[in-house]
Image: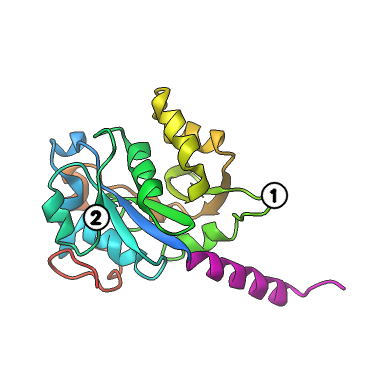
Amino acid sequence: MTLTREIASEITSQVASQVTGQITGLVLAGGRGVRMGGADKGLLPWAGATLAGHALGRLRHQAGPLAISANRHIAHYQSLGVPVWPDEQAFEGPLGGMLAGLVHCQTLWLLCVPCDAPFFPLDLAPRLAQAVGTEPGQARMAVARAHSAGPQPVFCLMHRSLRDTLAQYLATGGRRVGHWARVAAAVWVDFEDEGFRNLNTPEDLAAHAAPHPAPHATGDGTAH
């Protein structure tokens, strides 16, 4: 018997919802902020909150526990009300933050987003979750891919079983997120381009209007 499209979609959504309940959301804010003149990007004010606060707000209904990857100003990030996990070796790039997340998270899955992209999709987690699984032959990592801009590997969902493989990749000098995704046999999930716009410079912060209010993001950058 062939399932109707509606029933198949409902089953897929139910499976994705089950996976979403096992996701830790991690905001990657551990960089040096070179293009921001060395400023700590996650703590920069924008549209009534910090960039990290906006990211937490957009993750709030896409994951269970939330955390931040940061390597400086730890107390400031802790004031946002979530755990802060530094890299084992500071400033190893996004992969260092991802590894810290895999080491510390208590859920089966880790969803990573950068702190400087406050427009990322509010359905990022469930759509990535539809592409992964734990059965033989199923992918353990899913990566967002923008229609025109291409792969966006820092927007990814990873199973915690990839921790040791990522640690080995970093230990051998690997730092490229896109290459790591291929090593991990990630699958790509297509999205519209708009959600993956980065605010990399002071000019970007000034030029772009605020997104629709992130759920529960407050003026001091916290998310409740």
Q: Which of 195 and 23 is in front in this view?
A: 23
- Circle 2 residues within 10 Å: few <14, some 14–19, many ≥20: few
Mark linked to residue 145: none
Task: Specify the amino acid type for callout 2.
Answer: His
- Circle 1 residues within 10 Å: few <14, some 14–19, many ≥20: few
Q: Which residue lies furthest to the top in this view?
A: 172
Q: Position of residue 9 (x, y in %)?
A: 66, 71
Q: Which residues are the magenta region?
A: 1-21
Name the residue beneath numbered marker 2: 208
Q: Position of residue 210 (x, y in %)?
A: 24, 63
Task: Specify the amino acid type for callout 1.
Answer: Pro
Above or below for 66 versus 175: below
Kind of element beneath mark 2: loop
Q: Can residue 49 be seen from the camera position used here?
A: yes
In-image side of 15 versus 156 (left or right):
right
Q: Nearer the viewer, residue 172 or 35?
A: 172
**Residue for point 39% across, 67% down:** 64
